[in-house]
């Protein structure tokens, strides 16, 4: 049966000495990666991790992350991939929600360890590369170092099959609480095959990876390259975008993948569009709508042999749902294309019937890559998973050629950069402040981010916090990418007759 | 501009825009703004816009490197070199 760690095992058998990962000056072959992953498997087994247990990873992209990921899967564990941009409070909530028994962390993410693992009753051990003698850790939790992994014995054989859960990826939900998307080994291996069905990759390919592996798009880059025997070149320095250009060229990367803000920054602040890119063969873009103007600019600036794949997906679909064939891009700017091989992607009316050409409806997706559901949340699962497939919450229409164009989101979510952000989570955080009576958070169009976050507040006149106080409070409790860019103080929010805030009116006032 | 004044201006921008007035996380002028989660990739773009629009500098793409931008001390040194 297909398993995610089976992808690594198969490629290691075929191409043991080929480079699987490059990170700075470090190059890791498939054989070395498998060996490191085996050590993790053995360590987890020695630590009492059993089939179905959750093991959380909190680290930036690195060979250690990849080894921990495959090693945990081989041990039969389900990986809970945490977003290192989040604050300790969120990590703690997700560790508790997932019931993770172990946490593997390193680098700067490890610095807040005591705060992260406080009050996590299921957590039995944490592994970090730093040991701080001053840390007071809960008695129930043993702190171990990387040496404890490298000296672990032989990995046991654990029977894992396609139906077993492989990962829980947390994503913002419309309720404000992060939801754990559960993906099985079968989901992830199916989506890997599906992607390779339209994106021709082989062992000569090297992807320059700036997307975090805890994000479904980044995870799909890892799995497709492991499957085809290609190389993942890890570069976590996108904040200094010219470094990425150097990596693309020095490492002779054949591919680059990004969300719209990556391309906006590369186009604005690097010489990306002026370079000849001798080795670059293709670009992929997903993670939200990129403006047709930027898409056109990239396509027209780069040599024609470099193909630009515009794609669409959701974490709930393992990653990928649609693609726009590069040779149709020029005639279909703004479209997300059609369903990828093995995915049935349709636009449907609320009664489930398929929409006519140009008629708006919700995008429904069916295929073996669709998630098992939300972790421990049958109510939220029942709102999106139906017999006809995943209800994506995206409002769209298809043209006469069958190409799909997204019009809006059905649900109250903001897409800021690569991140799906819940307006409700931010509103609830702001409402914790004394003096704030009402809060309404919306996404407004932004050239760089796709959508930027703005908050509209009604405050009690006598006890009103100022803008800086609101932003400081947000920063303390929310990841940086969730902090509003602008705060508006108003006397009242526009509402309909039943008292519901009219967000469209606020958006229109920004335009 | 004197070094101290320049330092205060850059420090002020970082505290105002990335920490919203809270100076506590910025423990030294040498600490990395990125590694310590004070600034992200969008923040770097905001910082560059400030240097260009408010301080009148022209910054080349190749100058967007941590050695120039990733700490208060690096920023002060960078801006002083640019102003020569």
Image (cartoon, coloured by chain):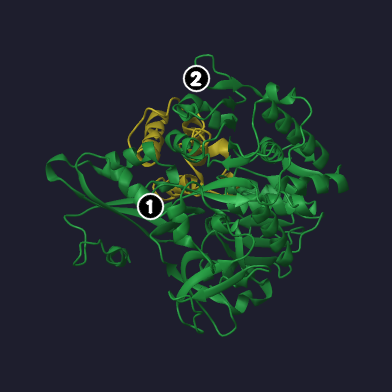
Chain colours: A green, B yellow
Q: Is residue A448 visible?
A: no
| Tag 2 secondary structure | loop
User: Measured from the top left, where is residue A270 in percent x and y?
Assistant: 59, 54
B47 over A141 or under it: above or below: below
Residue furthest out toward the top: A133
Tell me the subunit letter for badge 2.
Answer: A
- Residue A57's x, y, as percent? 59, 37
Q: Residue A310, percent across and down? A: 61, 66
User: Which residue lies under the disc numbered 2?
Assistant: A137
Choose the circle earlier in sequence order: 1 or 2.
2
Foreground of the two, A360 or A414? A360
Q: Which mark is residue A175?
A: 1
Instruction: Respond whether the residues carrying marks 1 and 2 are from the same subunit.
Output: yes
A297 or A169: nearer the eye?
A169
Q: Quadrant of the C terminus of chain A?
A: bottom left
Q: Residue furthest left?
A: A462
Q: Residue at x 80, y 51 (%)?
A: A229
Residue A12, above or below B77: below
Tell me residue B46's x, y (percent).
44, 48
For mark 1, name the chain: A
Q: Are marks 1 and 2 in contact (CB under 8 Å)?
A: no
Q: Is residue A305 above or below residue A154?
A: below
Taking the image as shown, residue A278 lies to the left or right of residue A436, namely right
């Amino acid at each position: 049966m297909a398993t995610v760690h089976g992808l690594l095992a198969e490629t290691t058998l075929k191409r043991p000495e080929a480079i699987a990962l490059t990170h700075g000056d470090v190059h890791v072959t498939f054989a070395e990666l498998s060996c490191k992953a085996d050590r993790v498997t053995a360590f987890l087994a020695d630590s009492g991790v059993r089939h179905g247990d959750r093991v959380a990873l909190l680290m930036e992209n690195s060979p250690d992350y990849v080894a921990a990921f495959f090693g945990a899967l081989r041990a039969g564990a389900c990986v809970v991939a945490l977003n290192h941009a989040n604050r300790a409070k969120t990590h703690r909530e997700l560790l508790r929600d997932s019931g993770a028994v172990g946490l593997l962390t390193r680098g700067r993410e490890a610095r807040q360890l005591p705060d992260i693992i406080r009050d996590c009753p299921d957590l039995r051990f944490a592994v970090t590369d730093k040991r701080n003698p001053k840390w007071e850790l809960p008695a129930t939790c043993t702190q171990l170092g990387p040496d404890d992994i490298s000296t672990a014995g032989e990995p046991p054989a654990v029977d894992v099959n396609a139906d077993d859960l492989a990962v829980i990826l947390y994503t913002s939900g419309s309720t404000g609480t992060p939801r754990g998307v559960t993906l099985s080994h079968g989901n992830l291996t199916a989506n890997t095959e599906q992607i390779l069905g339209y994106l021709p990759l082989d062992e000569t390919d090297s992807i320059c990876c700036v997307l975090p592996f805890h994000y479904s798009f980044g995870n799909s880059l890892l799995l497709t390259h492991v499957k085809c025997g290609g190389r993942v070149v890890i570069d976590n320095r996108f904040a200094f975008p010219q470094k990425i250009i150097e990596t693309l060229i020095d490492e002779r990367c054949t591919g680059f993948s990004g969300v719209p803000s990556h391309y906006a920054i590369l186009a604005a602040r690097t010489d990306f569009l002026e370079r000849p890119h001798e080795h670059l063969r293709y670009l992929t873009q997903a993670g939200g709508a990129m403006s047709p103007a930027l898409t056109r600019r990239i396509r027209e600036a780069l040599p024609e042999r470099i193909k630009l794949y515009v794609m669409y997906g959701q974490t709930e679909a393992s990653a990928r749902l649609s693609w726009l064939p590069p040779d149709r891009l020029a005639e279909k700017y703004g479209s997300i294309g059609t369903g990828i091989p093995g995915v049935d992607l349709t636009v449907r009316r609320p009664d489930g019937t398929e929409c006519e050409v140009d008629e708006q409806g919700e995008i429904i997706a069916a295929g073996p890559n669709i998630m098992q559901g939300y972790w421990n949340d049958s109510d939220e699962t029942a709102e999106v998973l139906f017999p006809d497939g995943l209800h994506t919450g995206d409002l769209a229409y298809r043209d006469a050629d069958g190409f799909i164009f997204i019009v809006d989101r059905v649900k109250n979510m903001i897409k800021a950069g690569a991140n799906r952000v819940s307006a409700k989570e931010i509103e609830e955080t702001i409402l914790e402040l004394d003096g704030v009576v009402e809060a309404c958070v919306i996404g407004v169009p932004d050239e760089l981010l796709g959508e930027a976050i703005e908050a509209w507040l009604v405050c009690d006149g006598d006890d009103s916090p100022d803008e800086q106080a609101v932003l400081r409070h947000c920063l303390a409790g929310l990841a940086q990418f969730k902090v509003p860019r602008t705060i508006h103080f108003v006397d009242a929010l526009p509402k309909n007759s039943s008292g519901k805030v009219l967000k469209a009116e606020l958006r229109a006032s920004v335009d | 501009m004197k070094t101290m004044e320049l330092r205060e201006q850059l420090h002020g921008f970082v505290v105002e825009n990335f920490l919203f007035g809270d100076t506590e996380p910025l423990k030294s002028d040498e600490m990395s703004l990125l590694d310590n989660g004070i600034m992200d990739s969008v923040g770097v773009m905001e910082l560059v816009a400030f240097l260009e629009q408010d301080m009148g500098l022209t910054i080349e793409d190749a100058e967007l490197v941590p050695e120039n931008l990733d700490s208060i001390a690096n920023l002060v040194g960078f801006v002083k070199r640019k102003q020569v």
